[in-house]
Image: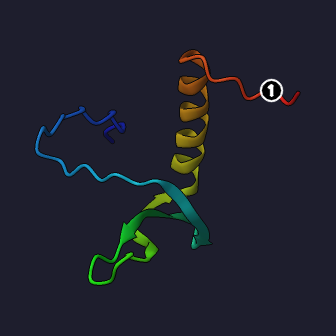
Amino acid sequence: MAKNQPANFVDDPHAPEIFSSGATGFFVANGNITITFESARVDHSQSPGPVYRTVVSRIVMPAASAQGLAIGLFDFLEKQGFDFKKT
């Protein structure tokens, strides 16, 4: 019986990159976490154009992976000098 080996990491320079100005919502279903991202968009068909909060993407991850993302991001931001201590 073969043991599970960790998968090799392959960096894809053509992977899509999406800008988001915020994480709008979180949802849990079947052990997966869905994170919805938004960005401000202006409707230029009017003047002045109204600004809308528009969904730009969603990520669905297993809960354990989402937890790893949250911990990793927090650690990274702390190392970059962001201070999250309550004053």
Badge 1 is on which residue?
85
* Residue 21 visible at all: yes
Q: Position of residue 54 (x, y in %)?
A: 42, 72
Q: Residue furthest bottom?
A: 46
Q: Quadrant of the N terminus?
A: top left
Q: Tell me where residue 30 appears, x and y as whole percent.
A: 57, 73
In the picture, measured across the screen, residue 71 lies left or right of residue 5, that is right
Tell whether 5 sits left or right of 15.
right
Classed neighbour count for the residue bearing mark 1: other residues with Cα under 10 Å, few (<14), some (14–19), many (≥20): few
At 17% from the left and 47% from the top, the residue drawn is 15
- Is residue 58 at all visible to an observer of this figure? no
Q: Of 6 and 60, which appears nearest the observer?
A: 60
User: At label 1, which amino acid type do we have?
Assistant: Lys
| Front residue of this view, candidates 11 and 77 | 77
Q: Residue sitting at 32 percent across and 83 percent down?
A: 46
Residue 7 found in image quarter: top left
| Residue 74 spot, x, y in % from top left | 61, 32
Q: Quadrant of residue 81?
A: top right
Element carrying mark 1? loop
> Front-most of 53 and 32?
53
